[in-house]
Amino acid sequence: MDKEALLKRITMNPKVSFGKPTIRNMRYPVEIILDLLAAGMTTEEILEDYPDLEKEDIQACILFAKEALTVKSIHKVAG
């Protein structure tokens, strides 16, 4: 699955989870999936615990986080 198709799995809807990024407009925030991965859970373990999710959803969360952290430019802040 290409990058754009993965990122389309991440939705932001003000009526779902207060507008936080979620997976496919369901009530699974990207933040929670990233927390589970950071805690050491594998993709397979997450999918076992959350049968509504698909492998591509987990990949989409990781890609979304990477894209959010990619530095586009650096500006000096006057202080």
Image: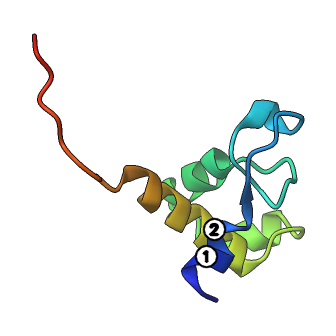
The one nearer the camera, 42 or 18, is: 18
56 relative to 67 in the view: left or right: right
- Say what amino acid the circle numbered 1 marks: Glu
Task: Provide the residue designation for mark 2.
Answer: 7
Residue 31 x/y as whole percent: 61, 46
Secondary structure at numbered mark 2: helix
45 relative to 3 in the view: left or right: right
Task: Provide the residue designation for mark 1.
Answer: 4
The residues tagged by marks 1 and 2 sit, at their Cα atoms, a distance apart of 5 Å
Relative to 34, residue 46 above or below: below
Residue 11 x/y as whole percent: 75, 54
Q: Residue at x 83, y 63 (%)?
A: 50
Residue 32 x/y as whole percent: 65, 47
In this rendering, does residue 66 appear at all?
Answer: yes
Q: Residue at x 86, y 39 (%)?
A: 16
Q: Residue at x 11, y 29 (%)?
A: 76
Please identify the quarter of the rendering in which residue 67 is found.
bottom left
Relative to 56, residue 67 above or below: above
